[in-house]
Amino acid sequence: MNTHVASEGVIGVEHGPPRRWWRWLATTSHKDIGTLYLLFSLVMLFAGGALALLIRAELFVPGLQLMQPDFYNSLVTMHGLTMIFLVVMPALVGLANWQIPLMIGAPDMALPRVNNWSFWLLPFAAALLWSGMLLPQGGPAGGWTFYAPLSSTYGPPSMDFMIFAIHVMGASSIMGAINIIVTIFNLRAPGMTLIRMPLFVWTWLVTAFLLLLAMPVLAAAATMVLADRHFGTSFFNAAGGGDPVLFQHVFWFFGHPEVYIMILPAFGIISEIIPAFARKPLFGRLSMILAVLAIALLSVIVWAHHMFTVGMPVPAQLFFMYATAIISVPTGIKVFNWIATLWRGSLTFETPMLWALSFVFLFTVGGLSGVMLSNVPADYQYQDSYFVVAHLHYVLVTGSLFAIIAAVYFWLPKWTGHRYDERLGRIHFWLSVVSVNVTFFPMHFAGLAGMPRRIPDYSLQFADFNLVSTIGAFVFGFSQLIFLWVIFKCVRGGEPAGDRPWDGARGLEWSLSSPPPYHSFHEPPAPDVIAAEGPPAH
Amino acid sequence: MAADAISADAARAGPQRVVEGLTYWNMPQGVTDTSQHVYHMHMMVTLASAAVGLVVFTALAWTIVRYRRSEGAVAAGFSHHMGLEVLWTLVPALILIAMAIPTTRALLAINRPEPASGQPALTVRITGSQWKWRYAYPDLGINFASNLAAASREASRKGAGTRPSQVANYLTEVDRPLVLPTDRPIRLQLTSEDVIHSWWVPQFGLKRDAIPGYINLVDLVVRKPGWYLGQCAELCGVNHAYMPIVVQAMPAADFDRWAAAERERLEKERYAAQARPWTMEEALAVGQKTYESICAACHQPNGEGIPGAFPALKGSAIVRGPAPAHIRFVLKGSPKNPVMRAFGPELDDRELAGVLTYERQAWGNDMGDLITPEEVKEAR
């Protein structure tokens, strides 16, 4: 405290946060920016969730009760874009912002001003995207995959809003990725070798490279659609000699790495939480890291498994099937290593652990349906059916989103200095984990029986499963209000968390006070601290 | 209670068509050679996944029950085990290889052209179109569009008076089903005239995209007569949910009789129509029929359109404006909006003259003028 006053008085080196809104607008602190990302993501979670509930409400019974089909299509589109680009990705970047400097013993991110800009682009991108819904012709309605020519020649004017929003979100992601790579390569504390880095940092390092690879490709696809719409080109217009299938190749060359961008950091989170509550080091650290690298490499050669029904040559179908199926090997290694970490541990079941364990169960469900989808003959039926909707929600909701929620419960005491309400956390968990299965499991059956995705209305054959899904969705949606309340209460106050609220947790962030000082690791952590908080010698 | 209400509704709705092999929990086994392969691969991967899942979940559940600190479990210190790690890399890899072999065989079998059985394949061209399917038999000189049945379309409107459960075959009935012979090789040619659609009939184990600029070829043999259902599987715009597929498969001899009768009927109809004088009654009859099968999908049977998506024709400035501009608009399509495409290539002069007259007369537009096929011909 004395040094703080003295230095501020003399040379102004020790700058604490400025006051009020200016602090949040102009901040270059990784902690403030992490908080901004997470709060933004939380707001958008409820926005995207409201869209999902409107979708489920329309699907409650056959017939059109609430909306016209074009509005339904724009709901489907906006729900997908919002959840992917404005919820899951910002939440993961927010966690990276908060945690990576703390976990590698760095004072801040390497490029703090770029960091501020990456965040502040997002609200404007979101406003641009959502304002398309206000146009008289309605919001973008071609699905988040915006296949041409439905989105190019036939797209409503709001497609242009969506294209520019994608450009802005892409710029934000690319800058965020560069910042994370530069931080990890340059700002690690002495003694924090790459191989000793926590798994969360490792997964984010790999993810950041995937982002650099994938986002420019998405920008290219969007720009080509823009050119087809306004500049007289015919990239995807068959009448002008273009190729509608080319769009799908370009889009999925981004799209498949994208799904790993959303799941690899989740793997990292789970690899931090399970050892903490098993009170045992992570099993097979090295094979965990190699598995992440293998998944990332494979993820860029499997894109056309989203396109088995476009009429590809058989050898191409075989190649993409084999490559896709192989991904299950490194993914399996991760699941087995988590189980081996739990094996002969000393387990307790605080809220973060409950979410992490449910992640292992339910992500495995999504992973297994993923292996099923890779089977080309079977995929002739699964493709574009509700089976795919079930699969993608198991990996994205009970995968990515559950891991993000687990991470928030895990690190919230560190960020705020208070313990959250454990009882409410458990209620939130149990309501969510039951209702999420009631929502998504029946979709497997609807899809197998022949229900296509992205339809506002269906024949009576599919009525039962849709009714059940809608009930589950509403319980799941409203359960998330408990999450909001838990966070609000915890930020406002609560029992002091102490430096290490979880006795089994290891990592440099736990060597700091809770909340950590506004500027942490001015001095690199001592070698013995790094050794004590790091993995056991191999 | 609810079940009673539904069955009462169904009784009012009239006969429910008997459709082959609708399933509830699982994929149908289907009635083509392809669908047999598809079904067996599906069951193989499902059972393998279930088995792997069972192992994983049992191990997880075991750790959760067995190693609780509250039960006095003390943590061990181990952090790796080369043998185990190699084991759970190799075993899944072997399972994958074991599944890849039959899958590769099945895929090659599905994509092998049908063995020559002495008969040439029957060619059927399927064209996706916002929002209906067009079926053509180029060798037989038959072609027609297949639209959602009017009763379903009416009940599917937001705020419709009838509930879906009160309509027979809600969203699973069309004005004209695709007719196919059984036990005869069929070659489908799939394409689209606007956006990408996907032709999916689960009973055939067949989903293939209909893409503008492409002709996708699919060979199949249907093994069992009956009615089969499907629908468009690729998001294709506003009425994506409302372009169902209904297939009637019949023995080859019946199919030949159907085709001959159909050709004869079409010719007779064309001849009779040409012979009838072009009066207001004739124009309105032709026009209403054409309107309901082509135009109503967007502009709605009541001519009111859907606000924000499809303009109303009731009171429309174009419809109530000078006839030549109206003719040109429908003939050549909208200069601004590709969804309102040129109907010149698709409809003949009588149909166009009829539908133009009908639009100008119906829903209180009351223009009272009769558009003649000659006027349309001149405007082409």
Image (cartoon, coloured by chain):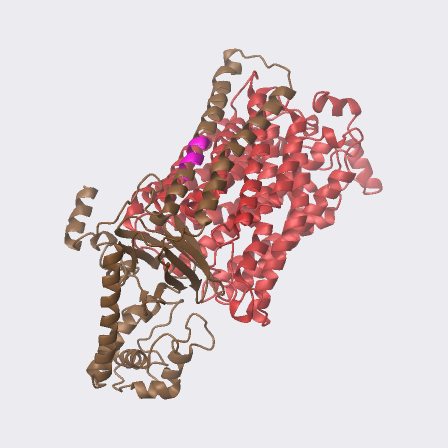
Chain colours: A red, B brown
Mainly helix, strand or loop, the magenta region?
helix
Residue B146, percent from left and from top: 31, 63
Residue sitting farthest toward the right: A10
- The image shows residue A422, relative to residue A113, as above or below, that is above
Any part of residue A483 in sight: no
Q: Which residue is drawn at 48% across and 30% down?
A: A361
Viewer-closest of A499 and A301: A301
Q: Where is residue B226? Give x, y as percent.
A: 25, 51
Q: Is residue A112 left or right of residue A169?
A: right
Q: Name the residue nearer the viewer: A212 or A374.
A: A374
B87 vs B11, left or right, is right
Residue sitting farthest toward the top: B72
Q: In the picture shown, does residue A290 fall above or below A309?
A: above
Residue A291 drawn at (x, y percent): 63, 33
In the image, is residue A8 above or below residue A166? Answer: above
Quarter in which the C terminus of chain A is drawn: top right
Asked if residue A290 is among those painted magenta in the image, a careful observer would answer no
In this picture, which residue range is highlighted in magenta? B42-49
Q: Quadrant of the N terminus of chain A?
A: top right
On screen, residue A234 above or below B116? below
Q: Can residue B249 be seen in this view?
A: yes
Give B2 or A228, whichever is nearer the viewer: A228
